[in-house]
Image: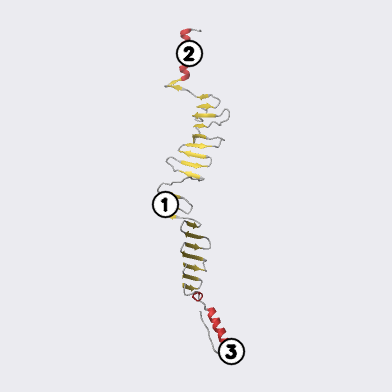
């Protein structure tokens, strides 16, 4: 910083002239003061400013800091290095991002996290693709989609594996084909409801086999055993019995 000294004695005119000169010098000094004037010999500073753009490199015993700032666009980036912490930050009028590295953690604060690597990609919408195995003690997600070959879709109250789904839309857990043709239910069904069924809804006549929780087995259609219609088979046996034994 500028230093001013004088030996003017007690002459009033000389004192007045000196004070005027001192005022001019102080005015000039404060109008042209640079950041270096406020730093001691223990601090090293490089500071460049032009218009509304500023860059700074500061080095002290405890830290090193780099900063680039544009006050016209309100962009601001900085790197701060301490003995136990490294931070990187970028600020814009719309968003800001910060990465902090300490001994036991890395903290990232940002708007959108994007990764483009050979083994992992994450886009701006949060869609992630891993080339390896994902291992976790617990996975919580609103929807899990396993692809199109053998689809695996899981969300609250609904799971689909291939053409079969587990659904609780009817107030109980049901495992059935997606078209409801084949399925089974747990034991908490109400009276008259199906425990096990096959062929449901495949015809207008309601053909199918149904195991009802009342202990009934309902067959709405033709029951065939070894290629023979069971009803015709029974009727043939009855007719043969009648022919052999009369009306007895």
Q: How far apart are marks 2 and 1 (CA)?
A: 73 Å
Q: In this view, does 124 lie above or below 211?
A: below
Q: Which of marks 3 and 2 is nearer the N terminus?
A: 3
Give SS at disc 3. helix
Q: Is residue 195 above or below residue 32?
A: above
Name the residue nearer the viewer: 2 or 206.
Answer: 2
Pointer 2 and pointer 1: residues touching (CB < 8 Å)? no
Colouring mode (rainbow / by chain / secondary structure / one colour): secondary structure
Name the mark on residue 141: none
Count of marks, rendered view: 3
Q: Which residue in the structure is indicated by mark 1? A: 120
Q: How far apart are marks 3 and 1 (CA)?
A: 77 Å
In terms of image quadrants, where is residue 15?
bottom right
Instruction: For residue 195, say whether it is visible.
Output: yes
Name the residue nearer the viewer: 215 or 37.
Answer: 37
Instruction: Select label 3 or label 2 by which is in front.
Output: 3
Q: Is residue 82 above or below residue 167?
A: below
Name the mark on residue 15: 3
Instruction: For residue 207, say whether it is visible.
Output: no
The residue carrying pointer 1 sits among few (fewer than 14), some (14 to 19) or many (20 or more) residues within 10 Å by Cα, namely few
Give SS at disc 2. helix
Where is residue 224? Give x, y as percent: 45, 22
Residue at the spot 46% in from the left edge and 8% down from the top edge: 244
Residue at the spot 55% in from the left edge and 82% down from the top edge: 26
Q: Which of marks 3 and 1 is nearer the N terminus?
A: 3
Q: Which residue in the structure is indicated by mark 2? A: 238
Where is residue 88? Give x, y as percent: 47, 62
């Amino acid at each position: 910083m500028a230093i001013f000294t004088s030996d003017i004695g007690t002459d009033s005119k000389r004192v007045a002239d000196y004070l005027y000169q001192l005022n001019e010098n102080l005015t000039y000094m404060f109008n042209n003061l640079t950041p270096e004037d406020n730093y001691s010999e223990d601090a090293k500073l490089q500071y460049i400013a032009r218009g509304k753009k500023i860059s700074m490199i500061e080095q002290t015993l405890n830290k090193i800091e780099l900063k680039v700032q544009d006050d016209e666009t309100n962009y601001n980036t900085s790197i701060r290095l301490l003995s136990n912490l490294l931070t990187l930050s970028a600020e814009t009028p719309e968003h800001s991002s910060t990465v902090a590295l300490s001994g036991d953690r890395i903290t990232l604060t940002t708007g959108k996290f994007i990764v483009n690597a050979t083994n992992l990609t994450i886009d701006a919408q949060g869609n992630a693709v891993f080339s390896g195995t994902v291992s976790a003690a617990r996975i919580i997600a609103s929807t899990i989609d396993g692809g199109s070959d053998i689809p695996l879709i899981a969300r609250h109250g609904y799971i689909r594996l291939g053409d079969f789904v587990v659904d609780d839309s009817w107030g109980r857990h049901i495992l059935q084909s997606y078209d409801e043709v084949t399925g089974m239910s747990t034991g908490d069904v109400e009276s008259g409801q199906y425990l096990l069924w096959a062929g449901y809804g495949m015809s207008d006549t309601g053909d199918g086999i149904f195991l009802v929780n009342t202990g009934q087995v309902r067959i709405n259609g033709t029951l065939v055993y070894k290629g023979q219609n069971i009803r015709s088979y029974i009727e043939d046996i009855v007719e043969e019995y009648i022919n052999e034994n009369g009306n007895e």
